[in-house]
Image (cartoon, grey):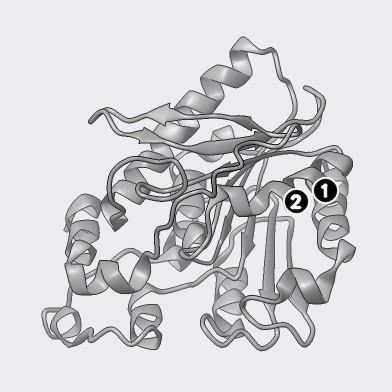
Amino acid sequence: MSENKSLSILDLPEIINFLFFPRKETPWGFPEHAEPFDVTTRDGVRINARFYLSAPDNPHILFFHGNGEIAQDYDDIGRIFQQFNISFLAADYRGYGRSEGSPSVTSMMSDAHEFLASLNEWLKQKSRKGSLWAMGRSLGSAPALELAASYPEKFKGLIVESGFAETIPLLKRLGINTGALESQKVQVFSNAAKIRLFSGPTLIIHAQYDQIIPFRHGEELYRSSTAKIKKIHMVPDADHNTILMKAGIGYFELIKDFIAHDGDA
């Protein structure tokens, strides 16, 4: 079964309504430390992103957020990444933030490819030489791993926060009836399989008490990784939505140190 077909199986309304929770931006616009980075897809849909830029030679992170978030939610986080000398590009999905269209699994994955193509061209035009890292949180681990597996030569490294290893167990945990998928032995995409295709430095961050995507998913991603340089970091006492609150500034120190040391080893 082709990847596109296996993705389209997940575009059923009863699945999409559980996976995606799109909402629009609030009207106050962009803070001074952020700037828009929008991509128009091949089918003419404009997708929003926010770039929190650091110096051209500093690392760049292409980030895909969770299903109930929007890029605007990362204004404060983007500012902290800038203070840690990291450029941070938070990408939205269709229907999220200022983006047009409606979200689907198929479009989320295909749009990620177009984001990367536009970003690479922009980095080249601006003579920005800093390394590029793929990063995804929760649902966003899927497009991040899709890109890392498809273009391993484009990325210096990979960061996965609260990522899931297998799709059907996640759907079950979200309350989705997967009986039809399992009875037909449908092969949906596997993040654990994709991470095997990327051998660059890989950092897995996961909450100890993640109630949506249990810590064992992070452990499976770590075991599946073929990276020579890899690290798994459990955030103690945190759940799916409290990683930053529990980790505090240590969250950013962890990422900066991994990029600066392990990522350049």
- Tell me the SS state at disc 1: helix
Number of numbered tags placed on the structure image: 2
Determine which of the numbered discs, if any, sits on residue 76 in the image: 2
Quarter of the image with the C terminus in it: top right
- Cα distance in 3D space between marks 1 and 2: 7 Å
Identify whether 187 is placed above or below 42: below
Q: Position of residue 63 (x, y in %)?
A: 59, 47
Q: Where in the figure is residue 120, as x and y percent of width and height?
A: 55, 24
Identify the residue at horizontal 51%, vertical 83% (top origin).
212
| Foreground pick, 103 / 258 | 103
| Quarter location, residue 221 | bottom right
Q: Is residue 116 left or right of residue 184?
A: right
Q: Amino acid at mark 1?
A: Ile
Give the x, y percent position of residue 219.
61, 78
Neighbour tally class for label 1: few under 14, some 14-19, many 20 plus, Cα within 10 Å: some
Q: Pointer 1 and pointer 2: residues touching (CB < 8 Å)?
A: yes
Is residue 197 among the parts visible in the rendering? no
Q: Which residue, given by chain and number where applicable, does mark 1 sit on?
A: 80
The amino acid type of the residue labelled 2 equals Asp
Q: Residue at x 33, y 42 (%)?
A: 110
Tell me: residue 177, above or below residue 206: below
Residue at screen point 56% across, 88% down: 211
Residue drawn 25% across the image and 53% down it: 3
Q: Quadrant of residue 124?
A: top right
Point out the frontmost of discs 1 and 2.
2
Observer able to see residue 97: yes
